[in-house]
Amino acid sequence: MDAENTAGISYRDEVRRKLIHLSSLWMVAAMCLIPRWPLAAAFAVMLALSVLWERLRALETPVLTPVYDFFFGRTLRAKPRRDQWIISGGPYVFASALLATVLFPPPAAAGALTTMLIGDTAAALIGRRYGRHRTVNGKSWEGMAAFIGAGFLGTALVLAFCRAPGIFYFWALIGIFPAAAVELFEKQLRLDDNFSIPLVMGWMLSMPMICGEAI
């Protein structure tokens, strides 16, 4: 949630990185307002384009590479070598948004993506600035607390926006802890947290449907 994954860039650039991260909140609003299958198709196209753009950047394609580096170069944790293809967090965000849209009901999908976007941002910024008590993988208890608090609050606000039944808030409170765990143990799981957090939280927020507690 902080030190290990952000040591390669300055705190100012980490703030820029997380502002880009938060710009994806438009996807959350779309999940609440746009029908599932047209939105899933749109996310699939965006995923393909983002992967293609990053591949072209790795090949140092004229025009595209300088544009990519201008907007995102300073926020990369490690500068790729020539012809080295390092997938950033962007395609993982699109992939998780796509799968969440397909697999989960709209309130669960929107809440799950919010948990990742808000919780991960809070964990990185608070943990890096104020983290003093270390836990595994160079991360901190302060960052973990920020993930849990901000992630749950953001998810609750989105559930309210989606007019989700009250039972969803209970599962959001339960689900924030395994979501924090997959963020904390990202290295051991070998799965990008932009992808794993929404899937874990989406499954938890789907429990009202699975248990027949909401319609």
Image: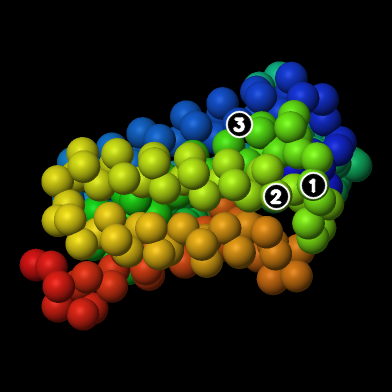
Q: Quadrant of the C terminus?
A: bottom left
Say which element carries label 1.
loop
**Residue type at the position of mark 1:** His
The one nearer the camera, 135 or 191, is 135
Q: How many neighbours does mark 3 have within 10 angstroms: few (below 14), some (14-19), or many (20 or more)?
A: some
Question: Mark 1 and 2 residues: CB-CB less than 8 Å, in contact?
Answer: yes
**Residue type at the position of mark 2:** Trp
Q: How many neighbours does mark 2 have within 10 angstroms: few (below 14), some (14-19), or many (20 or more)?
A: some
Q: Which mark is residue 18?
A: 3
Counting residues from the N terminus, which is met first, the one under dot 3 or under dot 2? 3
Q: Is residue 143 shown above or below 67?
A: below
Counting residues from the N terminus, which is met first, the one under dot 1 or under dot 2? 1
Q: Position of residue 154 (x, y in %)?
A: 39, 40
Q: Which residue is mark 1?
A: 133
* Number of the front mark, 3 or 2: 2
Q: How many neighbours does mark 1 have within 10 angstroms: few (below 14), some (14-19), or many (20 or more)?
A: few
Counting residues from the N terminus, which is met first, the one under dot 3 or under dot 1? 3
Q: Is residue 17 shown above or below 145?
A: above
Q: Position of residue 11 (x, y in %)?
A: 77, 25
Q: Which residue is mark 2?
A: 141
Question: Mark 3 and 2 residues: CB-CB less than 8 Å, in contact?
Answer: no
* Number of the front mark, 3 or 1: 1
Q: Residue at x 76, y 63 (%)?
A: 187
Q: CA distance from mark 3 to mark 2?
A: 20 Å
